[in-house]
Image (cartoon, rainbow, N blue to C red):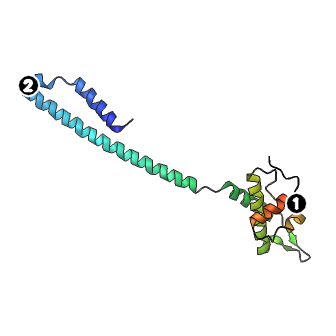
């Protein structure tokens, strides 16, 4: 409801409750005029308060929108969970038995694999978004791929059972 409509409605109801100003004595007229001025001052203050309230609501709405924009992308979150889950598996590399998570290139490759799996899962493919314990052989072929898109393509090609839900 517009603010001007509310104010005009309030002034109209006040004018209906006031006696006819032309039938009053000059002392009563002055008193009534003073009351009308007081009501106008009050309405002006009320209008300012309402404007300040609306401005503060708009600021709150902008802040809420900014907060929503700061939220983490679900695919990104799923990818990070996948990577954290993989780090707990303590895979070892080759005969040296060095932890794979300590190798920067290998870890970055796992991050890409996790991202690819999370994206495929979000696209509706029937794929477990985390890396299974027994998936080392499958994963090793993708670790050093250049991009997430290449890994996604590889997963689609080499998992014939992969289908959209």
Q: Is 89 in front, or is 114?
A: 114
Q: Which residue appears at 40% of the width and 48% of the height?
A: 55
* Residue 81 shows in the view: yes
**Percent x, y for residue 100?**
82, 71
Residue 93's image quarter? Answer: bottom right
Given residues 109 and 133, the one toward you in this image is 109
- Percent position of residue 116, x then y: 76, 60
Q: Is residue 88 visible?
A: no
Query: Is label 1 or label 2 in front?
Result: 1
Question: Which residue is most to the right?
Answer: 95
Task: Identify the mark nearer the N-term, 1 or 2.
Answer: 2
- For residue 83, side relative to residue 159 (left or right): left
Q: Horizontal placement of 8 versus 123: left or right? A: left
The image quadrant that residue 53 belongs to is top left
Label 2: state its secondary structure.
loop
Q: Marks 2 and 1: in contact by CB < 8 Å? A: no
Give neighbour class at mark 2: few <14, some 14-19, many 20+ (Cα, 10 Å).
few
Residue 49 marker = none
Residue at image position (85%, 59%) is 157
- Disc marking residue 158: 1
In the rendered image, residue 3, in percent from the top left (x then y), is placed at 34, 38
Which residue corresponds to the image point at 18% horizontal and 23% vertical from the top-left?
19
Badge 2 is on which residue?
Answer: 25
Question: Quadrant where the N terminus lies?
Answer: top left
Q: Within 10 Å of the Cα at label 1, are there few (<14), some (14-19), or many (20+) other Cα atoms? A: few
Judged from the image, the secondary structure of the residue bearing numbered disc 1 is helix
Instruction: Name the residue nearer the viewer: 60 or 127.
Output: 127
**Residue at 53 percent of width and 52 percent of height:** 65
Asked where in the image residue 117 lies, by quadrant, the reply is bottom right
């Amino acid at each position: 409801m517009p603010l001007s409509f509310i104010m005009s409605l309030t002034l109209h109801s006040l004018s209906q409750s006031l006696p006819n100003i032309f039938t009053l004595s000059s002392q009563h007229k002055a008193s009534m005029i003073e009351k009308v001025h007081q009501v106008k001052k009050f309405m002006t203050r009320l209008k300012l308060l309402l404007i300040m309230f609306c401005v503060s609501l708009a600021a709150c709405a902008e802040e809420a929108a900014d907060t929503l924009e700061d939220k983490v992308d679900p695919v990104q979150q799923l990818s990070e969970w996948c990577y954290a889950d993989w780090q707990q598996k303590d895979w070892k590399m080759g005969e040296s038995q060095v932890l794979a998570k300590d190798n920067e290139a290998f870890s970055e490759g796992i991050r890409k694999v996790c991202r690819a799996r999370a994206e495929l899962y979000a696209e509706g493919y029937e794929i477990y978004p985390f890396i299974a314990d027994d998936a080392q052989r499958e994963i090793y072929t993708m670790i050093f791929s250049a991009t997430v898109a290449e890994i996604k393509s590889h997963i689609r090609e080499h998992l014939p059972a992969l289908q959209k839900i």
